[in-house]
Amino acid sequence: MEAEEVREYIETLKEKINYHNYRYHVLDDPEIPDAEYDRLFLELKKYEDIYPHFRTPDSPTQKIGASPLEEFNSAVHTIPMLSLDNVFSSKDVSEFDKKIKRFLKREEDLEYIIEAKLDGVAVELIYENGRLKLGSTRGDGINGEDITPNIKTIRSIPLSLLPRFDPYIPKRLEVRGEVFIKVKDFKELNKIRGNSGEKLFANPRNAAAGSLRQLDPKISASRPLDFFAYGIGEIKGRNFKTHDEIFSVLPLWGIKVNSVYRLCKNINDAILYYNEIKETRDDLEFEIDGMVIKVNDLFLQLQLGTISRSPRWAIAYKFPPKQGITKIIDVEFHVGRTGIITPVAIMKPVPLGGVEISRATLHNQDEIEKKDIRTGDTVLVQRAGEVIPEVVSVIISQRTGEEKKIEFPSKCPSCGTETVRELTFYRCPEDSCPGKLKEAIKHFASKRAMNIDGLGDKIIAQIVEKKLVEDVADIYYIAPEKWAELERMAEKSAKNIMASLNRSKKTPYEKVVFALGIRHVGEHLSRVLTEHFTDIQSLSLAKKEDLIEIKEVGHEVAGSLIKYFARRSNISIIEKLKRKGIQLSRGKASPGEGKLSGKTFVFTGTLDSITREKAKSRIEELGGDVKGSVNKKISYVVLGKEPGSKIVKATELGIPLLSEEEFLHLVRE
Ligand code: IVH
């Protein structure tokens, strides 16, 4: 090959790899198998090794990590990287809005963007003519540290901007954002560190910070760092008018923007969105500690300016903290529906994430020993992704010597049967254990299962203790006067329970299967199983080899299903449910049959006249399915107001877009 040909070949390889990096890390939708990617990568490396003068600093091969540095150089921010004022109440947020209006001398509503406040490390990326030139930390806001070699190892940060969807790349672009680690990756990272005896990171933020400030870029490269942009600094050669315009263009250049944001026509809408995210933040893949509210108009931002290191045009509306310190008063042992006995710490009440908490799970004996938790200890507790709070660690310096070791009971605390040890757990083997039954009914009646309103813990405890039920199905057989006789049960609420029981008979088959509480069979697997087996009869007769043929079903799940259906008592539950008319087979609009059968939908943005949940159940009623992200198998992408970056991907893959109106038309009978 001639030198020029080699150069061109290297350029094409780089372009291809950059494009596939974008597909993989930004769109989460790889186009080629990993092996093919590796092949391209090795090919590029090979050519660069032979022709080193064609190796450029923005080559994807340079992401592996350069040689260690002695120390970081300092990097000055052209425009200072400011911090934000924090507020904790909607009253303070309204006050922020009023102040801005006073300053701007205007009365009409202001448009705001409200977006997730990521809990990571702030960085600045400088692109010149589309190439990443510098990556730095925030430092004191004016002087940061040059961490370019480390930044270059982050797989979701492009070394060059993609011109493909928006060719007007600025001459200079300063991108500001947060480097973070996803919760799942953080847990995995700590697991690996734990296994090799290394010190654990306290939280994803610390892990991100520790991984980014490494003098050896190879260490950064080995950590699962990720990035979201939240704004820009200096920009030359391109003009933006609003913050939401920035958010819609950055992804086109391959820079990830977090999709948890909304453009609001006034401050009250922003407060509503904050409340929405506050309730659902545990479902996110990354940790956020609040929301940032920003004036959308960039000209107004400029007019508003800054006061002492914080902009006047933005504010951090923080979530109530999820960690707190309290004392363990006692430890109780709780039997779950599968018989597993869990130690539960009874604590001095402490506010966590907006609610008062007085119980936390201690998981199992190994966990107690590992963390050396004792009754009387002062502990750090947190509400993490799980609803039940947990004890993170003991504050050893607060020990008085009065603390007591936690003894595991050898008998089931509910029925007194001798427990059996299974791996890290103790389990009650007794079928008729009332503790297990109470939990089984709780699960059966829960919102995501049969959704039986009014069947709370106290009522469940009474019907079990009064022996009105022997299994979950018996709740449909309790006579009305028996309900009415229960303590704290007025006639009206007895009627209400009867009505909810009746209503629950219409619960779709897949939820009924979930409600049965078969070990290892959660919501997703129930859906999968009911798609494969049209009724409970065929599911109950399925052989292990039929079950493991299903992609999502492994040996453990298959074994658990076989065990469940082999028990006479469970078959009797199913018979009893059947007799009361509970749906144990696919209805008429199950997958494969309705008008939208085989069609998959993805939503982006806010729908005006229907909630997402309603829209989802409408699609499901008609036999279709709703997915969370866009890939080439999706049939339609439905656009609400302020659609997110999914639109980019949909357009790229040529998936038909539907307006809200078109969508409503489609799902109308
Ligand atoms: S805007 C001038 N937006 O919070 C406005 N910051 O307390 C500067 N942060 O240093 C920041 N998510 O590290 C902004 N969506 C977001 C953010 C965000 C996280 C961090 C950032 C900043 C700190 C300010």
Image (cartoon, rainbow, N blue to C red):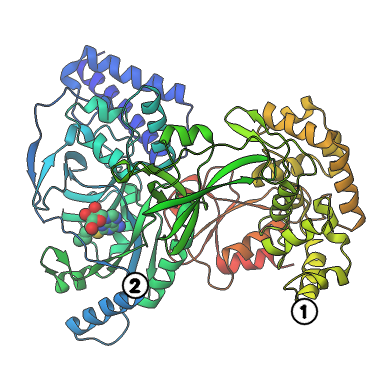
Q: Is residue 312 above or below residue 104?
A: above
Is the C-beta of the residue carrying label 1 under 8 Å from the nearest atom of ligand 1? no
Q: Quadrant of the C terminus?
A: bottom right
Q: Secondary structure at mark 1?
A: helix
User: Of the numbered discs in the image, which one, if any, rests on residue 89?
Assistant: 2
- Residue drawn at point x = 40 percent, y = 47 percent: 286
| CA separation in Å, label 1 and label 2 | 38 Å
Q: Tell me the quarter of the picture where residue 27 sits.
A: top left
Q: Foreground mark, 1 or 2?
A: 1
Quarter of the image holding residue 9? top left
Amino acid type at image mark 1: Lys
Residue at screen point 58% across, 67% down: 611
Residue 380 point in image, percent of width and height: 37, 48
Labels 1 and 2: the sequence-earlier one: 2
Residue 87 in sight in this render: yes
Q: Is residue 476 left or right of residue 659?
A: right
Q: Residues within 10 Å of mark 1 (few under 14, many from 20)?
A: few
Whether the residue under disc 2 has CB within 8 Å of ligand 1: no
Left or right: where 45 falls relative to 30: left
Disc tally is: 2
Give the labeled residue for mark 1.
Answer: 492
